[in-house]
Amino acid sequence: QVQLQESGPGLVKPSETLSLICTVSGGSISGYYWNWIRQPPGKELEWIGYMYYSGTTNYNPSLKSRVTMSLDTSKNQFSLKMSSVTAADTAVYYCARRYSSSSRWFDPWGQGTLVTVSS
Amino acid sequence: QSALTQPASVSGSPGQSITISCTGTSSDVGGYNYVSWYQHHPGKAPKLMIYDVTNRPSGVSSRFSGSKSGNTASLTISGLQAEDEADYYCTSYSTISTYVFGTGTEVTVL
């Protein structure tokens, strides 16, 4: 059973870069689409983007200029970097898998990690 | 790209049926049969309950069902149980290959 676990600093200063890692266990990272999704406090979920194991990416246009995703197959991990963060980037960040190019759902998800942007 | 609209809360007694709506536009819900639903107990990983509007993943109770009419998708929970108390979110594939989520619905079992 594939399980995902997010990790990274819980506190980031404004204007700095947020960095998170999602570790995949119980299965390979190869062959799937790996997504980041976030939920600011009191707000709806927001899709950030995905990275295919081959390196192809697709980012939410509203965040594209600040987002970079990467993948490390040797460690079965994929990562998110978001630059120039502000308080509006405070959120619970989730990683999730899409099974294939034709699957338009997310399964499984990680438990999420809270990132607070504050000085 | 606006969030899909869901009722903030829905409640029902054990054994009853409830329906959660998810309203979007022709650019998302109405334009594709790619609506999925997730159950979220706070502090836990969200769980896929329905995909592609009506399909139920293996292991998900048959008490959960999905449907769609026009720009509105719906999740119905039949035979409501205490364990169903959670937050529920819909999501839809959207134009320009993105995804939009619903505002979320808190389900309370009375």
Image (spheres, grey):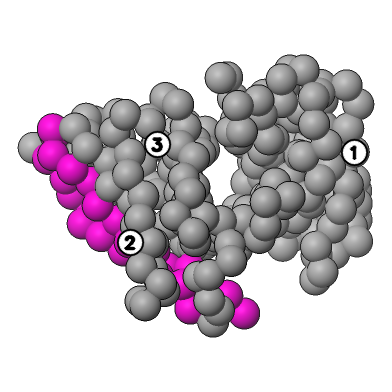
Amino acid type of the residue tagged 1 in the rendering: Ser
Horizontal and vertical percent for residue A72? 36, 68
Query: The residue tagged with tag 1: helix, strand or loop?
Result: strand
In the foreground, A65 or A26: A65
User: Are the residues under badges 2 and 3 in a single subunit?
Assistant: yes
Q: Residue at x 46, y 72 (%)?
A: A24
Relative to residue A75, is residue A26 drawn left or right?
A: right
Q: Which residue is mark 3?
A: A40
- Tags 1 and 2 touching, CB below 8 Å: no
Horizontal and vertical percent for residue A70? 35, 55
Disc marking residue A21: 2
Label 1, label 3: how many angstroms apart (C-alpha)? 28 Å
Query: The residue tagged with tag 3: helix, strand or loop?
Result: loop
Amino acid type of the residue tagged 2 in the rendering: Ile
Which dot, 1 or 2, sits closer to the camera? 2
Task: Write down the region rendered in magenta.
Answer: A1-25
In the foreground, A64 or B21: A64
Q: Which residue is mark 1?
A: B67
Horizontal and vertical percent for residue A12? 16, 45
Label 2, label 3: how many angstroms apart (C-alpha)? 18 Å
In the foreground, B23 or A83: A83
The residue carrying pointer 3 sits among few (fewer than 14), some (14 to 19) or many (20 or more) residues within 10 Å by Cα, namely: some
